[in-house]
Image: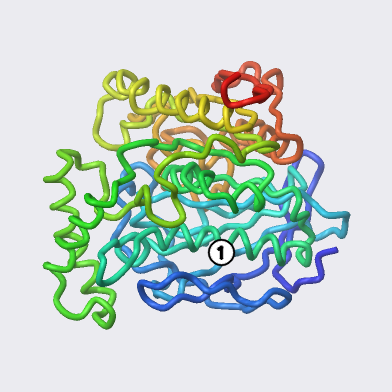
Amino acid sequence: MNSAPGHVVDVPTDRGNVPVRRTGPLRYATADRFRPPVLVPAGGDVPVSGAMCPQPPSRLEAVMGPSRNLPQDEDCLHLRITAPATPAGPRPVLVFLHGGGFSSGSGLLDWYDGARISAEGDLVVVSVNYRLGPLGFLRHPDVAAGNLGLLDQLAALRWVAENIARHGGDPAQVTVAGQSAGAISLALLLRHPDTPRLLRRAILQSPVLGPLQTDLAAAEADGAAFLAALDGDPFTAPAEALLTARTAAAAHAVERTGSRVTPPFSPVVGADPVPATPPATGLEGVDLLIGWNHEELTAFGLSRAAARAAEGPTFAAPVAEFGAWATSAGARVTTYRLDWEPAGSPFGAVHCLELPLLLGDGAAWRDAPMLGDVPWSDVDEFGRVLRGEWAAFARTGEVDPAATEGHPISWGLGPQTPPTSPNS
């Protein structure tokens, strides 16, 4: 039973209004600057204001529209819980990790509100903040070990395991969904031995599996460029100075990679908690849903034709390679592609387009150029179908392609039976 306090709202569904309770923001961990997170003790909720990590403006505002401004503060390891208000047995849990290129975003933004999917799918939804930019991903031998944002995410999953039952959730039925940077994070965290014990299923939405990861040497070179540009001591300089120095590190990353897509601070392969080599086993019993949108890269200036041409090497091939590893390690894998092209949108099936179908509401997405001229009622109608598939996957590990027949989504591989050994 959900005994936690919170604000109850009615959510319209095809079954009538369903009351859901929003609880939080709550603190799941604390962290000193450039140090790993420390999990808060289990058994009690610590209400907080709900700040997001200090960050520059999102580079996807031209696609997604402006986000509601939240306070920015380094004390940002917060989460929010949305759950049906009617008492029931333990419900499946959906944890969401936001995107933003490891440099912007917050799980507490209205875009990522989980009320609709919670009410329709009878799920407990948890939206998570984590540290970004240099605060979350700087690696330098004298300052930070890197991957602190990933360690934050692991801490959030541990908090869920220890506390979600008090909010009506079933800790044995946790699905973690990540979008873009959140999906990349999840793909890398699946290499860590603790992760399969903290989740039952995972949904990876638009993971760029390659360019947004760095090796140790490249990460330390970007870190050195950051420190050279920083005015002050990295441990005491104001957050604004860190963001200014981030610009210099971004220029260094562009020069190093030749790509303006690669952020200066992103996960480091080979640093805790990401082993350099994916394990051969360890995903037994884990269900994975992985997919992308048909014209992702129009968000970054490509034409629709060029975005489709880049789909194979940027998404399809890396997802297939990742799926092959996950299957060999014991997981069951399902893939999808969102083909929706909203009328009046110049972007087509662009990066982030699935988000308003799954999370948030009409008010949160009213200024999103990627939705074109489509009335919110049509967005919500298609979204109800997609939310049903995500909720079914969170409950059973399977989707029903027949349920989306006539809708612009393509299903690739159905659930696969893991091989009996990595070599079979």
Q: Is residue 285 left or right of residue 244?
A: right
- Going 52% across and 45% down the picture, which residue do you hit? 178
Residue bearing the label numbered 1: 155
Q: Amino acid at mark 1?
A: Ala
Quarter of the image with the C terminus is top right
Image quarter of residue 224:
bottom left
Helix or strand or loop: what does disc 1 sit on? Answer: helix
Q: Position of residue 417 (x, y in %)?
A: 69, 22
Q: Which of 14 and 397 lies nearest the eye of the viewer?
A: 397
- Going 49% across and 63% down the picture, which residue do you hit? 152
Up-down relation of residue 336 to residue 69 (above or below)? above
Q: Is residue 105 left or right of residue 262?
A: right
Up-down relation of residue 295 to residue 165 (above or below)? above
Q: Which of 73 and 77 lies nearest the eye of the viewer?
A: 77
Q: Residues within 10 Å of mark 1 (few under 14, many from 20)?
A: many
Q: Position of residue 81 (x, y in %)?
A: 66, 62
- Going 59% across and 36% down the picture, which residue do you hit? 281
- Going 30% across and 62% down the picture, which residue do you hit? 138
Image quarter of residue 382:
top right
- Tell how many labels: 1
Q: Which of 36 and 3 lies nearest the eye of the viewer?
A: 36
Q: Which of 205 and 307 lies nearest the eye of the viewer?
A: 205
Image quarter of residue 168:
bottom right
Q: Position of residue 282 (x, y in %)?
A: 61, 40
Q: Is any atom of residue 256 visible in this view?
A: yes
Q: Residue furthest right?
A: 88
Q: Position of residue 3 (x, y in %)?
A: 81, 70
Quarter of the image with the N terminus is bottom right
Give the colour scheme shown: rainbow
